[in-house]
Every structure is written in structure tokens, then in C-alpha cells.
Image (spheres, grey):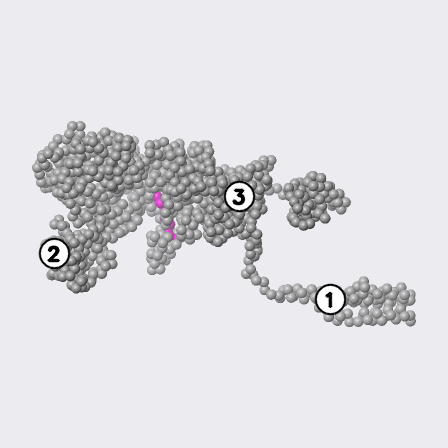
Amino acid sequence: MKASCNWIREIAAIDASASEMAERLTRAGLEVEAIERVGEGLDRVVIAEVRGKRAHPTKDKLSLVTVFDGKGTREVVCGAPNVPAPGARVVLVDVGAVLPGGLRIESREVAGVRSEGMLASEKELGIGADHEGILVLGDDDPGKPGARVDEALDLRDEILHLSLTPNRPDCLGHLGLARELSVLFGEPFAPRLTLLPSKLMSVLPEAPRGTAALPVIDSGTGHSGETASLVAPVDGVPMVAPIHIAAPDRCARYVGTVLQRVVVGPSPFWVRHRLHTLGQRSIDRVVDVTNLVLLELGHPIHAFDLDRLDGHRIEVRLAREGERIALLDGTERTLTADDLVIADASKPIALAGVMGGSETAVRPGTKNVLLEVAWFDPRSVRRTSRRHAIHTESSHRFERGVDPSGIPTAQRRALSLLTTLAEAVSSPIGVDAETRRIANATISLDPDYVRSAIGDASISDVESRTILEGLGCAISPGEHSGWRITAPLHRPDLTRAIDLVEEVARVRGYDRVPTALLRPEPRPEAASSRALLVRQVRRAALATGHHEAVNFTFLAASDLTRARVSTEAVALANPLSEERSVMRTSLVPGLLANVSRAERHQRPRGRIFEIGRRYLPGNGPTSVDETASLAIVAFGARDQWLGEGPSVDFYDGKGAIEGVFASLALTVEHRVPANVPGWLHPRRAAEIVLRAGEDARVIGHVGEIHPDVADAHELVTRPVIAELDLEPVLVALAARAPKQVAALPRSMAVVRDLALVVEERVSLSQIAHAIREAGGPLVEDVALFDLYRGKPIAEGHKSFALRVTYRDPEATLTDARVEETQSRVIARTSSELGATLRA
Amino acid sequence: MSDAVQEFEAGLARLGGDVTATFAACIDENALRAENAKLAGPQGELTALLKLMPKLPGDRRKELGQRANQVKQAIQSAFDGRLAAIARAIREAELSGPQLDVSLPGRSVRPGGQHPITKTIEELLDVFASLGFEISESREIELAEYNFGRLGFPPDHPATDMQDSFFVKGRTGSAAGGGGDDAVVLRTHATAIQVHEMLARKPPMAVVASGTVYRRDDDATHSPMFHQIDGFLVDKNVSFAHLKGVLTTFLKRTFGADVPVRFRPSYFPFVEPGGELDIGCTFCRPWVEAGSEAQIARTLACRTCKQTGWIEVLGCGSIHPVVFESCGVDPNEWSGFAWGMGIDRIAMLRHGIRDIRMLYENDIRFLDQL
């Protein structure tokens, strides 16, 4: 919302500067984002009168214009097509002036003729949108020749750019802002608005049956000394139009007033200028008045071409399913039975509160007008506006809540402007269809509550009362104690006591709220917070050398397919793009994208992990299971001291998992998987088993990426990747007991090396198991220190070089016992696994 | 005098000569040991000499034996001395040898870089934890009832414009034109934690939660997925002044005790009175030498605060009675405050990240720097 400081000052007696207003509004919750100064830099631009015009000697498109600048006459060269006849006033830019756009005007020859200045367009002066020709003032525009244009036309203004929260529809107009500023500056508020039509029909019609008449002159206030001129109505043109509200829950009140003899034409300069500075386009005198009223009072109104209304009547009803309407924005819409429309006897003529129809719009040649001033249900307007994706100044205000008590003011203000600017003759009454009266909220408020809720005992009753009354609240004593407050209808956001507390705090200023501290009582359960357990996992992954990634949790369905993870995903109904249209079922696609990115940017090695949620269709109120997951990827060359090592393989992935779990003090094992997930290499993957006491469960997988998946991502490296379910890990972490420590042995160990040749199919764990079984409690440790394939070992075989540590904790081992045990170990590996001692 | 005695004595005389000089000529341990072996080793001269002992006459044997032993000891002692000298020389050479190139890379397992989002969340949560708040979390895919309805967003209210939501396919709600409490949305804020906690247990409570949230915005300054920390406190006799005190303390602990804090009114449907807290811009630091030419120039050039000197960091307010009522908590007995803050921008501020997209690209060259 843009607001003119000049306009605010016209309505209310506020003498604060623009920056003071902005500061005060911002501190009261009405954020001013910027102050824009308009009409600057025009100190050498004056009003001039055209005295003569002749053709340029050589150039057809140029003319030589003699103007009187208040002191003397001079000749300027002008290229505009609209140089007016002598007597008309134009705007002269003096030699030496620099226009707001940076254009410097010099005395110079134009095609051989010296030009002493320039006649300017609105756009060149930065005061309007028109650049078709020079600015020509109309008869109703002020300013004598020689007068500075910025002073004569009142061009200097400061425009506040407000960012309003949706609870303050009252400030979507200058009247409301003036009221708010009056409260904030502690000034009484008595708005200055002309509410008297200048031309009235000389015959008083009767309101149609079933509707009331709203007199356009407020007998209550009276306009002493002011009179409207009376004009005879036009024969054959109705003075009133019947109004029927068929959807009373959607439209509480509709006032329609007939105007005759309308002159539709370009608006005077001040209207065009005011609309321009507030970001609106000038259309014609009638439409401009409706926009002026909207900007001034915050109440959207609409003007129909009365002669185009079938039956000269208005019906406010729900659209029929499939009914069509051509709108002012040039589009045609198909309506639903939930859209509220304004209709004539045969067809919809406007989307109520959103946009008018093009067929009944005011246009050049329009003679008679029906002026609509109404109150539509905010939710109804909002639904229609959203459904058809039409957001207008009108819908913006109606959906936030327009002041229902402002209808007579809006009607009279519009009639006053239309009868003056568009020379229209107003019917003495509007037809007033009202289906229900919107009631004021009444609220009980104890001034003690104001103090206790804000936490400031120093707020006096008088101060609270002054603020609330300034905002338009009426205060009477409460039934038992405290106050009974009637909230004004322009503040639909005030419905309960806390709303009034906020008003007091807000108007006083939050900087005046004192600060107090309090300390929550600790709860013992809080220590095992899930977030803190997740943090331990993150620490472990970081400590083992992995960078942390945070990927988008939504991606394209094709990302799931390409990574061969589950495609049974939660899909979005309204994604921003196909690329982010389903929730991830795995963290694997995200990490693969990170690897791909690294390769593209010449960093084809690294270790990355992510901790995040997977979303799977499930049960519960949302039908989604969100579970925490940990994924790790290693890719490219392995780290070594200098240069690059060989590419990472399965064991780097396994090692990463072991490292993470070792640092978490949890036990995992790796096993040949029962089922290999699609994203992993079928022969180079393991399932990860979490062991907690007697309980062992598969929590995820680790392995080389499936080569087809690597190809599908156009990867050069063959990443090793793991993903596991974090939920059981968090449970185990929460239940984890401190590690127990055994006493250190006093006896010496005996170490024996053993080289065993076995077939490829025999695993290290089988050999180690056999050694432990055969050696019994004397075997303390079995460690592999070399693995060899190749000559002289037979094809299909490998050699394990093992270091076996024997120890008897009770006694010193004799050589004989060791030899005897080792023989049993060798015999067992031979009989059970076909192992032979390497020669 | 027998020949044997003569030979023996000659041998002793030869071996008893200047052994020290002989050994001193040996430049390393190997040469020394070779020389020593020649003299005193099993194949050496002394051993050969001692083999003559049985041939010596009985009356001289003792005396000659003693002299031989003296010679042996002299050789041994000279050997030991020379050996130690050689070892010392080697050590001296090592200690005065060439300086190591300490600029060569070290060998270690480097810890990975933590993502700025999680790092910022952890640090901010820790501050709240130190102020006595429990850390909690809740689901990201949420019923509209919890994300909007119970938080006081009226149906069709324009407040939802501020955070246009993603809906889950097939669960867009039963209200006319979509929406309604039974719709399932990607949560637009982490505020639903209030509803979950208040439905689950009785006050008093003080909880803070972080999480991923989603809004249908995607431009230079908005990401459709981002992160928030939301927190709230419910107890008896909690006032707006408590909110101001606790959150100001949080901001000063987080951003520095000297950073100014500004508190101004704003609107969120689930709080009232509602407000926003700004901190002085941590880039141009307008409170340092405030009013000086240097400070004004700094602030006028500051892109971070857009020349305002302030950075908006959190929205907050007293918990609206509507929220208490919708969660079965009596607003006449309990009161409280709540706040929510976006993490992404704070993370960007802290790490000097200029482009929000960098946060979610996970470029390894970006992560390497963390």
C-alpha cells in the first residue's frame, strides 16, 4: 500500500514530517518500508501560456511555439503533436534546468531554429504516465503563467510504502491511516471530507418495494450554507434501480445509486497526478473517482453503465455452474456455484468484490451510471479471488474486511466527486438493500488485565482508555467490574480482550514494555531428547572425516527411479516444478546428485553424509511415515599422505560405518545381505546389523553403487554408499550403558603367525571362527595382516596371513601348550574349511 | 726361557700397544667392530695368544695370565669408549642435520565440515537449552489442523497468503476449493510443536524445536525449503515483559552483548500481542562509533541490512488464547509466549554466504571450507 502524506494531511490535522510518520507507524506495527519523494527537482519549471504557434521552416514534425512565461514571451521548438491553441496553459522547462530523469535543458538550435527552453510531458517531468504529448492544463487546473509548476499544481509529496499485516484492513485507505496517525500522535481525529453531491435530481423517487432508500444528503450532519443545484432528471432513464440480494450470507448490504448526464473524459491533472503517485493508472473521470474513493476510504466501489444493465436492475446471487463472464482484464471466466456475482436481469455483470465485467463497464459515451457501494463476505471474495487467480485492489480489501459502517460515507464521497468531476447529476436516494446488520463486537476488559498481560504495572487506566477511545472504541462500565468495550466496525480484528491489550501495548510502543526474566522448571525426561541423540550421530560422522550435506527433501519422481530407490513416494498436489514434486524415500538420490556435482566441478573425490528424514506412505493421521535416516557416501581416490591413493571400495564404506558406530560405542556387524537394494552392487554390498544385547537387526546397507546406477548418473567414479535407518540407532543410543572395562592380564601372551591357503569362497570370518572354536579360551585375538592372491598360490585360492594371540590369563603359557593348541587350530581349519598351511 | 713364553710376551707387547689410537682410526661402528674382532674376537690375536696358555711353564702361567687379562680389559675399554664416541657423533650429526620441511602436509583423519544450517541450529538450540528450554521436534508433513486451524488461522483467511503451502496429493482437504483441517500440508512453520506438546501433556512447559519447513516461494532470497527454530513457554502469570526479557537475553547471548535489539509490533494469528525482534546489523555494526562519518558510510554501503542498520531475526508474541483453547489449556489459568525464527538467513549472516542456493547445492568446494 502506498500512501500520500499530503492526502493524509488533507484529511487530518497532522503536522508531522513524512519521516516522523514513518517512524511512528513502524513502531506501531504498520511497517513503512520506504519513503519516496515526488515532485522534486522542478524548481525551474513554470506554467506558461501559449501565445502563438507556427510551422518549423524545414521539419514537418516540429512546430515553433510562442509562450508567455509570466514575464515575457519566448519561442520554443516543440515536437509534440498536441500543441494547444493560444490561451491554453502548458508547462515550460527553463534553460539550465535539469529534469528528474537527468535531462539538462539548454538554449540550443533545433534544426536551425533556436529554442529557449522546452515544453514537457508528464512523463518527462516525472509526475505522470503520459508521454504521448506535452502536458496541457485543463480549465479546472490551477496555476497562472509564471507560477512554479510544483507549487501551482501541488506536486511535492512524500509517498509512504507500507507493508501492512493482513489484520489491518482499516489502514488500506488514507482515512484509516489518518485516524491511526492521529492516535499515534495523540491528536483528536475529525476527518475533513466533502460528502455533499453538487448536483441532484429535482425529483425524489421512491425506493422499489422491499428495499430501503438511503438519502444521499445526510440530514443528520446537515451541510449548512451548502446547497446542491437541482437538475431535472432525464426522461426515460430510471432514477433508481431495483436491487435484490439472493445470497444474503455473502452480501450484507448493497447500495446502488443512479447518476445521470455523466461526462466521461480524461480527468483533471490533480486526479491523474494523485493516482500516478500512488501507482494507479488514470482511466477516465468516472473510473478515476471510484479509485480515488478506494484509496481514500479503503472501500472498493464500482460504477456500471446503467444503460447496459438488462432490466436496469441488480441481483446479487451465486453464479450458476458453468456461467461465463467477460472481465475488465480482457479475460473470460467460467464460474462455479461458489462464486458470488452481481447480475442484471439476464447475466453476471461483475465478480462481486473482485472485478467488474467488460460489457457493462463505463466507457467513452456512457451517459448514465449505477454506482455500487456494498459489503461482501471476506471469505467469499477470497475464495473467488483465489479460484480465478485474480488479485485486485478491491479483492485485497474485501477479503481482509471492509468497514460495513462506511457505506454511506463511501457513497456520498463518490457522489460528491462524480457530480463535481464528471458533472453527473445524482439521484437523491440510493437503493439500500441490507440483509443483515454487521454487529459491533462487545468486549469485557479489566484494566488490570492490560497491566498483567503486558507485565507493566505503570500503565494507568486513563492511558489505556485514551488509547482505546482514540482508536474508535466506545467504553462503558462493565456489568460487574472493569469495562465494557464496543469495538468500531472498521477494526474487525478487535474481538477479544487480548486484542485490546495489544492495542495499548502497540500504541504505547513495544520499546516501553519492560523486560523481565523467568526460568523454566527443568524436567528430568528432557535429557534424552531425540535431537541431542541425532547430534551424537552427526558428531560421529563428522569426526570420521565426512562433510555434512543438507539436500532438498523433495525431488523429481525420475530421481527416485534413476537411483533405484523406492518410488512409492508421497507426492505434492501443487509442486512448484516437476523437479521438486515428490518427497524423497531415501537420502541416496540426494547424495548421488552431490557426487555428480563434485565430479562436474573437478573435485571427483570426497566423503559426504546426510542425516535427514525419509517420507514413506504410511499410517497415522497424515498417512506418512517420517523416519530419520543416515546416509554416507565416499567417492574417488582414497586419501593418502601424498598424491592420490587408489579408488575407494567397499571396505572404505564398511570402515566408515564401523568408525561412526565405534565412536557411538555401539556394535555393528556386516553380513552378506539377504536382499540387496537395487541401488547397490549385487556382489559388493553388505547388510548392516546393529547388535544391542541379544537383539540383532538389519538397519541398512553399505556397498558399491550399482554400476548401472552410476552410469545413469553419468558418474566417472564408482561411489561407495550406505544408508541406514536411524530410528533403532537412536533407541540404542538412549539405552546405551557406559562401556565396561576388564582387568588387564598379568600373564604374557604368545603370538604365532599362520599363513593359510583357502578357496576364494572361504571368508575371513569363517576362518577366524574355526580358529576360536579350536583354540578355545586361549585364543585372545585373530588378526589378518596380509591377504595374497597369485603365484605360487593356485588359481581360485587365496592366502590369509594371520597373527594369532594366545594367552592364559591365569598362568604363563608354555611352548608346549601353544604348539599343541596351534596344531588343533590348523587341523580344524583344514578339516572344516580345506585350509592348507602355506609352504 | 721357553719359546712359548717368548712368543706370548711378544704377543702381549703387540696387543698392549696403543689400542686407543688404533680404534680412533676406525670411522664407524663396522670398522671399529672389525678392528676389535681382529684383536679380541674369537678369531682374533688375543684369542690365538690365549690358546698358548697350556704351553706356558707353570711358574709363569699365573703372571702372564694376569697380564693377558689386563690387555683384554684395556682393549675392551678402548672399544667401549670408541663405540660411545661414534654413537655420540652420529647423534650429534642428526641433531645438527638439515631442517625438516614442516610445510609438507600432515597425516591425519580430518573431521568433516558441518553444514551451516545444522551448525547454526545446534548453537542456537544450545543457547535456549541454557535458558532452560527442552529440545523437541515434530513431524514435517502435517495436518492443516495443526499447522493452521488450531493455531488460530481462520479458514480462507488472508493470513495464509503469507505462507502459501504445499499440499499432499490426494489429501488436499475436504473444504470447498481445497484446504480444511483434514488437508495434509508440508508444514509452513515449526509452530505446530505447540499444539503437539500441549495436547500431549500439561503445562508448565518450555520447549524449543528446530525443523525443516516449506513455503511455495522460490526466488533469489527465498528457498521453497528452509529451516526454523520455534519455541514457546507456558506457565502461570507469564507476561509480554517475560517474552521481551527472555528473547532479548537469547539475542544478546547469540549475537553479542553489545548488539542493540529493537522490538516492534507485528501480526501472526497465533500470538497476541505479536511482534518482531530486530538486531543491529552485524555486518555494518551501526552502534559502533554511532553517528560518526565512518559509521554512516558503512551503513549506507551495507547490502545486508539494506542500509537500515537493522536485521529482522524473529517473530514472536504472547500465545493467543485461541491456541490454548484449541489445545484444551485454560487461558485464564495459563499464559505464555512463543517465537519463531528463520535459520537460513542467520546461517548465511554468520558464514558470510551471499547466495541462498549455496546452502542446498552441497557443492564439495563449499563444504570443504566449513
Point out which mark residue A50 bears: 2
Amino acid residing under circle 1:
Ala
Residue at x 14% of width, y 60% of height? A56
Mark 2 residue type: Val
Residue A502 or A689: which is nearer the viewer? A689
From the viewer's side, name the closer residue of A718 and A549. A718
**Which SS does the magenta portion mostly show?**
strand
Label 2 chain ID: A
Q: Which mark is residue A839?
A: none
Mark 3 chain: A
x then y, percent, for residue A462: 27, 41
**Cα gap from disc 1 to disc 3, whole angstroms:** 63 Å
Residue at coordinates 20% horizontally, 45% vertically from top-left? A283
Q: Is residue A362 left or right of residue A803?
A: left
* Residue B202 in the image, given as x and y percentages of width and height: 44, 34
Give neighbour class at mark 2: few <14, some 14-19, many 20+ (Cα, 10 Å): many
User: What amino acid type is highlighted by mark number 3?
Assistant: His
Which residue has dot 3 on it? A706
Residue A601 seen by the camera:
yes
User: In the image, A233: left or right of A130?
Assistant: left
Left or right of A10 in this view: A545: right
Task: Reply above or below: B111 against B339.
Answer: below
Residue placed under numbered mark 1 in the picture:
B31
Q: Is residue B276 shown in magenta?
A: yes
Magenta segment: B275-282
Say which of marks 1 and 3 sits in front. 3
Q: Residue furthest top?
A: A209
